[in-house]
Image (spheres, grey):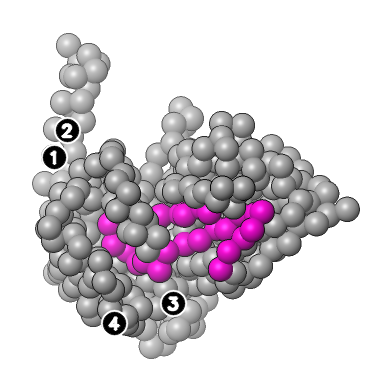
Amino acid sequence: MKLLTFDQSKCTNCGACSAVCSLEKKGVVQPSQARIHIKAACAENGEKVLRASVCQHCARPVCVTACMKGIVHKDPETGFVSREKEGCIACAACAVMCPVGAAVLDTDANAFLTCDLCGGDPACVKVCSSGALSYADPAEASAAFRNSYALKAVGRGLVK
Amino acid sequence: MSTLKISCGAADAKSGILLSAGILAGCGAPGADVMIWQVAGKKGFKYYESSRLAAAMNFAGAGRVAIKGKSEEPVVIYISEGKAVAEPFCGSSKELRDYYVTDNTVVLSVEDCGLMDDAGNICGEEEIAAKLKSMNICGIVAEGSGAVVPADAKLLRKTIAGMYEALDMACCPEIEPEDEVYLAMGINPKAVCKSRKYKGFVKKLVKAVSGEEAEL
């Protein structure tokens, strides 16, 4: 299964992904309602890092077990985590439990929603000019990330 | 005595500052986050600077904010839900960011060297910072949890996707005088290289966002 992967070293925090996500899903540009958010955080060494808050379609999704209405499902074959808009009582259990803060309260539907990968053609990836977002197989993305990190480390003289 | 006056939707700001976000600011197109400052002086001059504040102002429903006069105590201009108010704030720039930064806010602090946004980008020169300091304004905050509602969402989606696909996104450092029309609309031509397609894309963006035909 392909997933959204995020390379923070390439991200410029331009906000295009959130803007286009809300445009795609709600027909208005409203980043606060987007299902992807780039958040700045402070690393242990004091450096500023960027993190993408977007559904990771976890292998063992806590949102599925947290939902008392049983409307969050994980497809056993594809691994895709989906949720029903109807039936959500906006209790926020999924949002509280999600380790990446991916669940967003849709104020029109009054339901918590997450990234549905736009049916396999994510709009955010198309507008990510820096290439920080990609829609790829996690194993391939991880290998590419490791390679790029190794190259950087060699360039910096961290690896001899 | 405080003489500070803040109004939204004003067309000019004699002896003051006009914070003006272009109609395309925040629409999601490349470079669509430009803040345009207009500072009225004896000769009348303008500043063009880039920050995420313009987009946040449009999301806050206040694309134009005029500020005149001087506050008695240090204040922050807080823009939210179509209104702009002066909130007393006494503290350092770090405290300002710590207090106001949320997922939906953009915070500009007035520093000696210029204006700095909460992402650490300098987005205003010493002169504008000095002008704001003289008015006793120590920061500008926009809480943008609202939306920019386009006239034609489908066209906007298509145009944005087309722009990102077709345009070379490398930075172009030079701003030429004719670029000011793009800046006024909220598009930073620095963010996109010059291209014959560019003008056509911006026309489509204006049509999609406002429903109006633009002549460029």
Q: Are labels 1 and 3 on one chain?
A: yes
Q: Which residue is mark 2?
A: A148
Q: Along the horizontal axis of the image, is B216 left or right of B181?
A: left
Q: Along the horizontal axis of the image, is B12 left or right of A16?
A: right
Which of the chains bears the disc numbered 3?
A
Q: Which residue is mark 4?
A: B152
Seen from the viewer's position, the closer of residues B55 and B195 is: B195
**Amino acid on which disc 3 is placed:** Asp
Mark 4 to mark 3: distance in Å?
21 Å
Seen from the viewer's position, the closer of residues A89 and B190 is: B190
Q: Which residue is mark 1?
A: A144
For disc 2, the neighbor class at 10 Å (few under 14, some 14 to 19, many from 20) is few
User: Is A155 covered by the magenta stretch?
Assistant: no
**Amino acid on which disc 4 is placed:** Asp
Q: Position of residue B77 (x, y in %)?
A: 66, 56
Seen from the viewer's position, the closer of residues A120 and A60 is: A120
> Quarter-wise, where is residue B150 in the image?
bottom left
* SS of the residue under disc 4: loop
For disc 1, the neighbor class at 10 Å (few under 14, some 14 to 19, many from 20) is few
Q: Position of residue A87 (x, y in %)?
A: 41, 87
- For residue B214, the mark is none
**Precedes in sequence: disc 1 or disc 3:** 3
Residue A75 in view of the camera: no
Q: Are labels 4 and 1 on one chain?
A: no
Which of the chains bears the disc numbered 1?
A
Q: Nearer the viewer, mark 4 or mark 1?
A: 4
Q: Nearer the viewer, mark 4 or mark 3?
A: 4
Mark 4 to mark 2: distance in Å?
40 Å
Q: Furthest residue to the bottom?
A: A86
Q: Position of residue A6 (x, y in %)?
A: 26, 49
Which residues lie in the magenta part?
Answer: B11-38
The answer to the question of whether label 2 and label 1 lie on touching residues, with beta carbons closer than 8 A, is yes
